[in-house]
Amino acid sequence: MTTNVCWCGCGGATKNRFVPGHDAKFHSQAKKVARGLLDENTLPPLPHQEAADEFEKWVAKTRLADAAKAAAEKTGKAEATEGATRTEVRASLVARIAELQARLAELDGDEAPATTEATAEVAVS
Ligand SMILES: [Zn+2]
């Protein structure tokens, strides 16, 4: 078995790319850098170009996912987001259903027989 230096920059030895658990740290740091929450220059230097490329890939991936998510939220279509989990899609759909039901109730309220102009106005507001 060959031993590698952990890709996260900690200097630890591993048989894989990362010391167990360090992949999560690596990826969360890339996400923070992508979101401007962490300065890349304050991180320990990565052991080689392959690790640096992987880090940049995750930064780019996070930026793309965040942009797609923001766009999807804007149009109320979180279900179109590539990175959206089943739970996120479900929550988005439940919210949309509630919104549509509220609009239906409003429409039904408008169609209810109004005896005077005054009551129709009350129903609208
Ligand atoms: Zn490490």
Image (cartoon, helix red, strand yellow):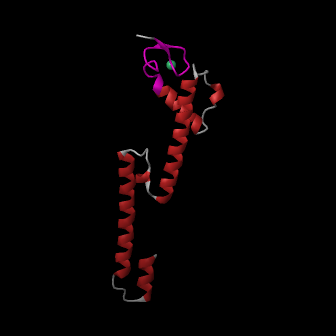
- The tally of labels here is 0
Image side of residue 60 versus residue 81, left or right = right
Image position, residue 121 (x, y; %)? 45, 82
Q: Nearer the viewer, residue 102 or 24?
A: 24
Residue 7 lies in the magenta stretch:
yes
| Quarter of the rendering containing residue 77 | bottom left
67, above or below 119, in the image: above
Image position, residue 17 (x, y; %)? 46, 20
Image side of residue 28 versus residue 86, left or right = right
Image position, residue 21 (x, y; %)? 44, 22
Q: Nearer the viewer, residue 122 or 88?
A: 88
Residue 99 lies in the magenta stretch:
no
Q: Can residue 58 be seen here?
A: yes
Q: Residue at x 48, y 54 (%)?
A: 73
Q: Residue at x 51, y 57 (%)?
A: 74
123, above or below 68, in the image: below
Q: Nearer the viewer, residue 81 or 121?
A: 81
Determine the main secondary structure of the stretch shown in magenta: loop
6, above or below 115, in the image: above
Q: Residue at x 41, y 78 (%)?
A: 123
**Residue lying farthest right?**
41
Which quarter of the rendered picture does the N terminus lie within?
top left
| Quarter of the rendering containing residue 33 | top right
Image position, residue 68 (x, y; %)? 50, 49
Q: Can residue 31 be seen here?
A: no
96, above or below 121, in the image: above
Q: Which residues lie in the magenta part?
A: 3-23
